[in-house]
Image (cartoon, rainbow, N blue to C red):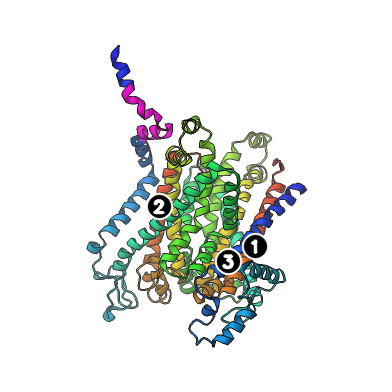
Amino acid sequence: MPAPSSRSAAVAPQDSESPGIRARRAGTAGILAALFRKRSAQIGGAIIVLLLATAAFAGLLAPYDPYRLNPLSQLGPPSSSHWLGTDALGRDEFSRIVYGTRTTLVIGAISVGIAMVLGVTSGIVAGYYGGWVDLLLMRVIDVMLALPYILLALAIVAILGPGLGNTMIAIGLSNVPGWVRLVRGNVLTIRRHDFVLAAGALGARDTRVMFVHILPNTVSSIVVLATLQFATAILAAAALSFVGLGAQPPSPEWGALLVGARDFMFTAPWLVNFPGLAIFLVVLGFNLFGNALRDTLDPTLRMS
Amino acid sequence: MIGYIVRRILFLVPVLIGVLAFVFLMRALVPGDPLEIMFLGQMPPDQATLTKLRHEMGLDKPLPVQFVDYTWSIVHGDLGQSVRTRQPVAAELAYRYENTLILTFASLVVALAVGLSMGIAAAVYRDTLIDMATMMLAMFGLSMPGFWFGLIMIMLFAVDLRWLPVMGSGGPAYLVLPALTLGLIASTIIARITRSSMLDVLSAPYVRTARAKGLRERVVILRHALRNALIPVVTILGLQLGGLLGGAFIIEVVFAWHGVGERAIQAISQRDFPVIQGITLVVATTYVLVNLLVDILYGVLDPRIVYG
């Protein structure tokens, strides 16, 4: 029959893709369905969507200007006009928390972005080339891991100087070791597969093999780690802001909101409770969603 | 075993040299002149004095020579002088380091006591309310900002109930709240790992044999199952201690606990590099040595491990 031969010719180019990509294309809908059957994905996803929507429509949701001082309503408890009360300068706490979602998202995206770009690149290079490149990179990682996570971030902030931008860089850099280890480990197993050897044998350059053939097969681990690290990054940035090294007043960053609140925690506990709750919920959302993703995409994946 | 320990110690040498190099470079990497930072916000002295100071501090020598000098003084216990308080860093850090270790150790005790009990209970009463509550708390612990939890503890126990002092580091009573804050958060992770490794072990044939012998359930769980279930818990102990040590840096600020963390954060905002460098070095060395101990402990607990 003539038909099959022409059809197989049309299908043929796709066969040059790695098996991972094809499996994923075929199964995206199935994976999503399995993901959202999990309770933790539903709750986590809802929190993330709520966060994104609040950040996008902050201007519409916030009843007041988050920076506007009002000497007439200082340290007011939650009321119908100020849902979450007001701070020591009379600013509306609800509006400040609403605008703070934007800072939170930027912090997560930038610090995870930095860690991911540096970590994935180094991880692929280390795993693919091996030898002295690998040895050198892994020794650098060993030195970074000789410092507890928060301390490494603090040391980098010490070098760069305090401020929100530097905090994001510091957190990003502190997260690199996790990425390098994960991606390097993945690459070590993937590079032995036939399709990688075939790509090399067909004359593909190293960069092409690494980024076109190997990288797509690590996507599921990358998505999982990025989601879970979004949570860690937000938590770390809030902690650094809380000790005065991250976002500076009058920024409505949630950790920074707690700095001022501390002095009034006995007279105005709502200033402590609400920003803290906001951080907790958002971090919980990313953790829940990340865990669900991990269980769905790769049940054998384990990250500490 | 001895060979393994020796190799493991030898492996530490490059790491410690790397840490030393990083700590040394911290000051070199900082944009701007160290002397400029030293006189930040003050009237800088005249050029001749600056040159003299630069010479005294060895800043006019090439970087590699400075590194050798730096290493030499570190080896002799000289961590330099704080550019703010003009006190020797080593003397300033000594009592603070002790305070941080006390806090970290107390938190570890809390974390292990609470985490192990929760984990065992969750595994033994699998799929019951206890199990579900433990798993939910584990998720909460992972997402809880430590500094916020600390503030809540202060509001609850020190102010509303008036049971404990609010903050400071006077006596044992001052230790309770910060240690609980750090320990309870860390306990949730230990609970999760204990639960899953207990579940693995409880289905093992030797546990069935122990039950079949007619041993009481308590003996089966605590003497037979727990011993093997502890091994994964020990492997993450090093990581946990790192988390507690790092967490202490923030929690010390919340409770005004006079440890190295509180001092580090002060030093970073004042750009007091000798202090920052000293703390980084001390904590990194501690962490590396603790991990060494954990690895050795791991070998002692699990004779099945073959050292190759």
Residue A106 percent location from the top left of the image: 36, 59
Q: Chain of mark 2?
A: A
Between the residue at mark 3 and the residue at mark 2, the CA separation in whole angstroms equals 36 Å
Q: Is residue B89 magenta?
A: no
| Residue A279 drawn above or below residue A182 | below
Identity of the residue furthest to the left in this view: A60
- The residue positioned 41% from the left and 67% from the top of the image is A164
Q: Secondary structure at mark 2?
A: helix
- Three-letter residue code for mark 3: Leu
Q: Chain of mark 1?
A: B
> Residue at label 2?
A286
> Residue at label 1?
B286
User: Which marked residue is nearer to the observer: mark 1 or mark 3?
Assistant: 3
Q: Which residues are magenta?
A: A9-27
**Residue contact at pointers 3 and 2, CB within 8 angstroms:** no
- In which image quadrant can residue A219 be found? top left
Residue B150 in view: yes
**Residue contact at pointers 1 and 3, CB within 8 angstroms:** no
> In terms of depth relative to the viewer, which is nearer, A26 or A184?
A184
Residues behind callouts 1 and 3 on a single chain: yes
Q: Secondary structure at mark 1?
A: helix
User: Which marked residue is nearer to the observer: mark 3 or mark 2?
Assistant: 3
